[in-house]
Amino acid sequence: MNQEDELEGDMIDTTLEKFESYEQYLDDHMSDEDLFYLEDKELARQLIEVGYHGKGEILTREQFAKRKAAIAEAKKNKNANQPKALSHAGTKIDHSPFLKELAQREELVRNGRMTTIIFIRDQKKGKNEISGYIDLAHRLKTEDFRLYFEGKKTLLPKPSDLSYYNWDAQNCTLNDSPNFRVDANSDAGLLFRNKRDRKVINVDPNKDPPGDGTKRVEIQTDEYTQVVFFDHITRRKH
């Protein structure tokens, strides 16, 4: 058996997990008789490490470290591959047309089959009117959306989103996101270019369709002044 085979086996056998250090591992192979005759714990460890007491296969410090690292990596990969529960799972959203639309898109956006830009225009009583374009995939990765689905927070544009405009303060910001590049200098108006397949989304309401593989969906809701979803089916470049 080669070294890679040994590591492969230990990635399944997680018995080393209970040892936080190599010294604890050696101590586990130490008997009361060892301590009685040697009267020195450190000396007993050294003898066990070199196999003097015939305790069976004893890993060297280097082998112990490598196998511990392999086990940790295997657990990390296993956890990464576990499907994550959707943020809207188990929440009551029938009262909210916006949250229902958001829930329909969550899985597709999370697994990368679709990217969605949300245009939100909102004005609450006594507050400035704001609007902006949100990269839903980026927000899903960086925020706890369960708070939105549970009604504890309201999804609103921020100055860090693709675009943000405060109508009263006349304050405007534009930012690229991990999924889209902003083109605000085009004669066609505000455009967003998908970084994966380089397809362009034109958010002009008179542009139908808004782009190749993109669908514009405006919803009616009392929750916001205006809400529009731009759903883009992503295609990987070959």
Image (cartoon, helix red, strand yellow):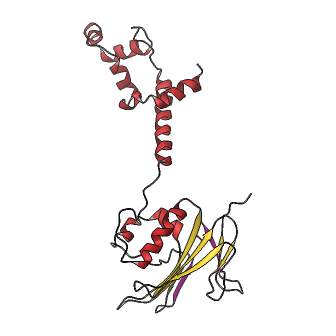
Residues 86 and 145: in front is 86
Toward which corner of the image does residue 199 lie, by quadrant?
A: bottom right
Which stretch is magenta?
Answer: 168-185
Classify the position of the C terminus by image quarter: bottom right
Vertical relation: 176 (above or below) 108: below
Residue 178 visible somewhere in the drawing: no
Residue 179 shown in magenta: yes
Residue 16 shown in magenta: no
Residues 171 and 80: in front is 80
Identified at 70% across, 83% down, the residue is 186
Identified at 55% across, 59% down, the residue is 111
Position of residue 222 in the picture relative to residue 4 (left or right): left
Q: Tell how many labels.
A: 0
Toward which corner of the image does residue 210 lie, by quadrant?
A: bottom right
* Direction front: furthest residue: 94
Q: Position of residue 125 (x, y in %)?
A: 35, 91
Q: Position of residue 71 (x, y in %)?
A: 47, 34
* Direction right: furthest residue: 238
Identified at 72% across, 87% down, the residue is 187
Residue 180 visible somewhere in the drawing: yes
Position of residue 22 in the picture relative to residue 73 (left or right): left
Vertical relation: 90 (above or below) 57: below
Vertical relation: 172 (above or below) 92: below
Q: Position of residue 217 (x, y in %)?
A: 55, 80
Residues 92 and 211: in front is 92
Classify the position of the N terminus by image quarter: top right
Toward which corner of the image does residue 163 lie, by quadrant?
A: bottom right
Q: Position of residue 126 (x, y in %)?
A: 35, 91
